[in-house]
Structures are given as structure tokens and as C-alpha cells.
Image (cartoon, grey):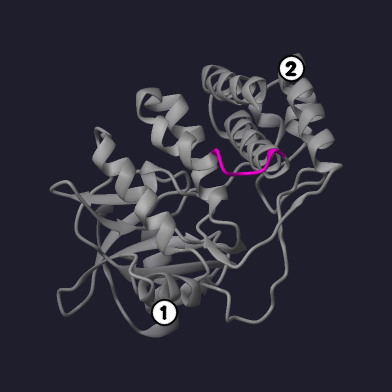
Amino acid sequence: MTTEAWPTAARLDAPRVLERIASITGVRLVLEGPAPGGEVGAAYVRWPDGRRSVLTAARTRSAVLVDLARAAGVPTPRHELTARVDGIRVVVQQRLPGTPPGDLDTAVVRQMLAVNDQLAGVLAAEPDPRPAELYLTSDGPGFCLHEPLEAFNVRTARLLGWVRSVGADGSHMVGDDLVHMDFHPGNILVDRGRLSGVVDWDGAVRGDRHFDLVTLLFHLRAHAPALAGDVQDRLGMLSSRRLRAYWAHMSLRQVDWSIRHHDAATVDRWLDVAEAGIASL
């Protein structure tokens, strides 16, 4: 089975988007070049007054949640302009200092843990406490698709069966914390050893901040397993039911995305992480 059998996310066409922003808003931004990281792309842009910002695509309206995170002490970029271009929401946001960490160390991981603490109870006073869907029993909106795992190979089909069995016991996340939903080293900025920014809040929801630690652990086990200890210790307080549900979501999300956007070696790497985690639950 080839990855071409399923839909993929379109990459950001920055030159076209900037032309459309100019025609819609009258603001002409200058493209400086691609920003590092990201699965669908981002670009550095410059305003007529010389300010430098970042252009990204967005699925959701996350500006309010980004502002709440900043009020809680988390360094987040302000949204400076939003527009809908050819049916896609795009955001021009403040460019924060720093870059994604090239080499992780314990100090950076502990700063990420401190950010996680800052997000506790951020949404307690906000209305609409609807639980966040983890998509363990049905497809997500462009991610967490089930069919790719079902059809790709025996290992992915077996993983999907486990995910669905976990989902039968509940496929939602509840809580009053602000959850980033993609909290890994590629979405933080570091400036001279200091965590200077948390970016890509597009999927942020209300829920349990420990979900973000499961996301972080998933990535550390793939790329820097020696640094996973502090995160694992934090997750020791989590109930088995919640930990299984969060691990199931991450397993589904990473393997599905890899099937549709990457190669077989990447699929195998995330399968290894998913299966090792399941064995330890």
C-alpha cells in the first residue's frame, strides 16, 4: 500500500498567500523566506514599516487561547493579521526571538515542564467546558484518520485495533487546563538556553495539561530517550485510563500522519515508539 492512497495536507504557498492578503486587506508584506520546521510550512515576512513576522496556515481561531497563555506567563506570539485565502485561514503573527532547539538538553525539557505547569486551570473561569475529542473511534478533521492504519500493514492495523479498544472506554479529554495539543521541541523557541517562545497553538483546546506531557514524551522517546525521565516522573500521577487514552491518540496521530506524508522508515519509527509505550502501560 502506498501513501498516495490517502489525502495529504497541502503545503503553505507563501507567495500566493501574500498576494491574496494584499488584494484582500491592502497590506503588502514582503516574503523573506521559509521558517524552519513545521509539517505544512511557515514563512518569515516583513511589514512595510520593517517589522518581521511569521506567516502560517491555521485550522482554528486560536488567538484568544494564545492571549490567555501569554497572560499566564507563557511566551506566545501575538496574532497581528488574519485572513481567509482560498478557503484557508492564514495568520500573520509576531516573530519571537530564538529558534527551535537543535540539541535538546535537560534544562530545555525542564523549562517545557514549567510551561506545562503555567497552563494549569487557565480556562477554569471560561464558559463552554465541552470535552475535547481524541478521535479514538472515528476520524479527526484532517488528522487521526483510521483508514490508513487499517490498510497500510499488519502492524498498523493491530495498532488501530488497540486504539479503538481504548476508545471504547472513552474518547474525550476533560479538564480546565489550556492544552497546546502539539507540545514538542519543534514548537518551542530557545534563545541562548532560555525558552523564548511556544508557537503553533492552532490545535489548542480546553482539557488536561498532562496530555501535552504525553505528546512530549512520545517525541522524546523517538529522538532523545535519555531526556525522558523527568517527563515520565510527572506522568506517574496520571490514572491508567487517562494515560492509555492519551497514548492511543498520539499513536494514532503520529502513525497516520507518517503513512500519509512520510516514508516507511518514519512509519516504523513511530510504530516502535507507540508499541514500546503500550507494552509499558
Q: Amino acid at mark 1?
A: Ser
Q: Which mark is residue 153?
A: 2
Q: Residue furthest front?
A: 237
Which secondary structure, mark 1? Answer: helix
Spot occupied by residue 133 in the image (x, y as percentages of width and height): 72, 56
Name the residue at the right extreme: 168
Q: What segment carries the magenta color?
A: 236-240
Residue closest to the eye, 200 or 195:
195
Image quarter (top left, top right, bottom left or bottom right) of the N terminus: top right
Q: Who's the residue at 55% across and 38% down the image?
A: 236
Q: Residue at x 46, y 74 (%)?
A: 63
Q: Judging from the image, what secondary structure is the residue with disc 2 in?
A: loop
Q: Which mark is residue 23?
A: 1
Image point (46%, 26%), residue name: 221
Say if residue 11 shows up in the picture: yes
Q: Residues within 10 Å of mark 2 (few under 14, many from 20)?
A: few
User: Considering depth in this image, is 165 or 271 the residue closer to the camera?
Assistant: 165
| Residue 48, above or below 180 | below
Q: Is residue 35 among the parts visible in the rendering?
A: no
Asked whether 239 falls inside the magenta stretch, the response is yes
Give whichever of discs 2 and 1 has the lower sequence position. 1
Residue 60 on image: x %, y %: 57, 67
Residue 255 placement: quadrant = top right
Foreground residue among 45 and 250:
250
| Few, some or many residues within 10 Å of mark 1 (<14, 14–19, 20+) | few
Mark 2: amino acid = Asn
Nearer to us of marks 2 and 1 is 2
Q: Position of residue 55 (x, y in %)?
A: 36, 63
Q: Report the front residue among 54 and 138.
A: 138
**From the viewer's perspective, is 242 left or right of 77?**
right
